[in-house]
Amino acid sequence: MGFRQKLIEHTRQDLQRLEDKARRPANWVGMLLYGGTLGLLFVTPIVGGAYLGRWLDTLVAGYSVRWTVSLIVLGIVVGGYNVMRFLQEKT
């Protein structure tokens, strides 16, 4: 069996393995990691916006939550966009 035949056989085995994997349902570990990734993509911009907004509000004299609320809302929008883009790439 020559090099070319071995390469063709290994490629055929790899393709069969990929097709078998595509037919099998996802296991719980894969779903947990997938959900964790989606959670991080959504929550990280919100938490970052909250911390940045709080820091900006401390620079203003008096009691203010204007930056905090604004950047939390912006974080929700950015997090939603991240999740939407991630799901579109995976499907």
Image (spheres, grey):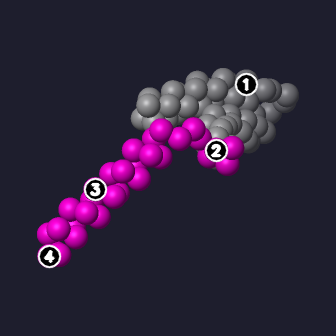
Secondary structure of the residue carrying numbered label 4: loop
Image coordinates of residue 30 in percent, x first then y, are 62, 46
Q: Nearer the viewer, mark 4 or mark 1?
A: 4
Residue at mark 1:
69
Give neighbour class at mark 1: few <14, some 14-19, many 20+ (Cα, 10 Å).
some
Above or below residue 88? Residue 26 is: below
Give the prevailing secondary structure in the magenta stretch.
helix
Q: Nearer the viewer's eye, disc 2 or disc 1? A: 2
Helix, strand or loop at mark 1: helix
Query: Which comes sooner in the sequence, label 3 or label 2?
Result: 3
| Residue extent of the magenta highlight | 1-30
Q: Which quadrant would the N terminus be assigned to in this image?
A: bottom left
Q: CA distance from mark 3 to mark 2?
A: 25 Å
Give percent across and percent down for residue 56.
70, 38
Q: Residues within 10 Å of mark 4 (few under 14, many from 20)?
A: few
- Residue of label 2: 27
Q: Indicate the amino acid at tag 3.
A: Arg
Of labels 3 and 1, the one closer to you: 3
Q: CA distance from mark 3 to mark 1?
A: 56 Å
Residue name at image x 27 percent, y 59 percent: 11
Which residue does the image show at 80% across and 33% down from the upper left? Answer: 61
3 vs 2, front mark: 3
Q: Looking at numbered disc 2 in the image, what kind of residue is underneath it?
A: Asn
